[in-house]
Image (cartoon, grey):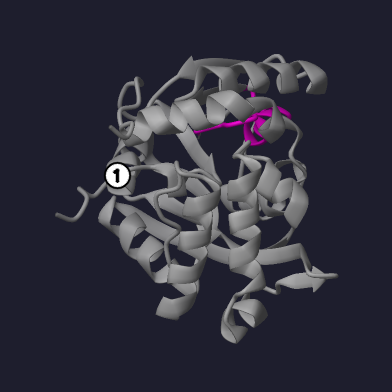
Amino acid sequence: MPLPQKALTREQFGRVASKYRCSADHTDVEDLDLLFTGLALDPGHRILDVATGGGHTAAALAERCGRVVASDLTPSMLREARVLAAERRVGNIVFAAADAEALPFRDAAFDRVTCRVAPHHFPDVRTALAEMARVTRPGGRIGIIDSVVPGEPSLDAFLNAVEKVRDPSHVRSYRVEEWLELLAGAGFLLLQAASLWKTHAFPEWVERTGRPKAVQWEVETIFLSAFPLAREAFRIRTEGGRVVSYSDEKAIFVAKKTGEPPAR
């Protein structure tokens, strides 16, 4: 019987947590510069970083703000985030095991809430956003970074299928338009939307999830046989019959909790 989605996520990331702490994709903080500008951070802010993973966002926040809570569903990810915090010499982070869809924090506890490159793993992203809204004070801000897919259905289907083969804990990368609806539905007023394209070195990207070599080759085969529009859109680069790199889009959203009840 297949594992429930959250158990699958714990198992998947529990096996490879250290790879995410050291990942070139996650240590590249160009997207954080855009996010932090929109969040208008203040040293006195109380910050929650949801699904912190290797702790890169939490550590960067802790260098700017006095009180940061880093939460994650996977205990081994929290261990890696502690290692990163020690390496960065930031001691003002509290670590908490937490399900993004049932955050163990009181209402309006935080001035800012962030979540970076994780929502595509959430079984119910609406519930997760509702929880983030609940723990954000009225007038506080939320910052989301995640992979997004193009509006063209064939490109959406291609990239989500690739991600699911590479990482069985993947649920869905959404379109920008879907994100705008999700944020509004959770009671947030959009302040900023930006995006950047990130190029992934294919060998490190496909190996990071720790999947068997046969699965890694299956992912590479999908890229090698990609239809022309996908090859162009995702900038798939090959040499000598092997995939060298590809690119995807990361969207960066900053929104304010309005104090109005969320849409139903």
Q: Quadrant of the C terminus?
A: bottom left
Rendered image quadrant of residue 93 = top right
Above or below, comparing residue 136 to residue 203 in the picture: above
Farthest-out residue, bottom? 228
The spot of residue 161 in percent (x, y) is 46, 61
Left or right: 207 in relation to 48: right
Amino acid type shown at disc 1: Asp
**Number of other residues with Cα within 10 Å of mark 1, as a class: few under 14, some 14 to 19, many 20 or more:** few
Residue at horizontal 49%, vertical 75%? Answer: 155
Q: Which residue is mark 1?
A: 124
Q: Is residue 242 visible?
A: yes
Q: Is residue 151 visible?
A: no
The spot of residue 262 in percent (x, y) is 22, 50
Residue 52 part of the magenta-drawn span: yes
Label 1: which secondary element: loop
Q: How many marks?
A: 1
Above or below, comparing residue 221 to residue 167 in the picture: below
Left or right: 153 in relation to 28: left
Residue at horizontal 39%, vertical 25%? Answer: 109
Above or below, comparing residue 223 to residue 166 in the picture: below
Residue 31 part of the magenta-drawn span: no
* Residue span colored magenta: 50-66
The spot of residue 177 in percent (x, y) is 39, 70
**Viewer-side residue, 201 vs 96:** 201
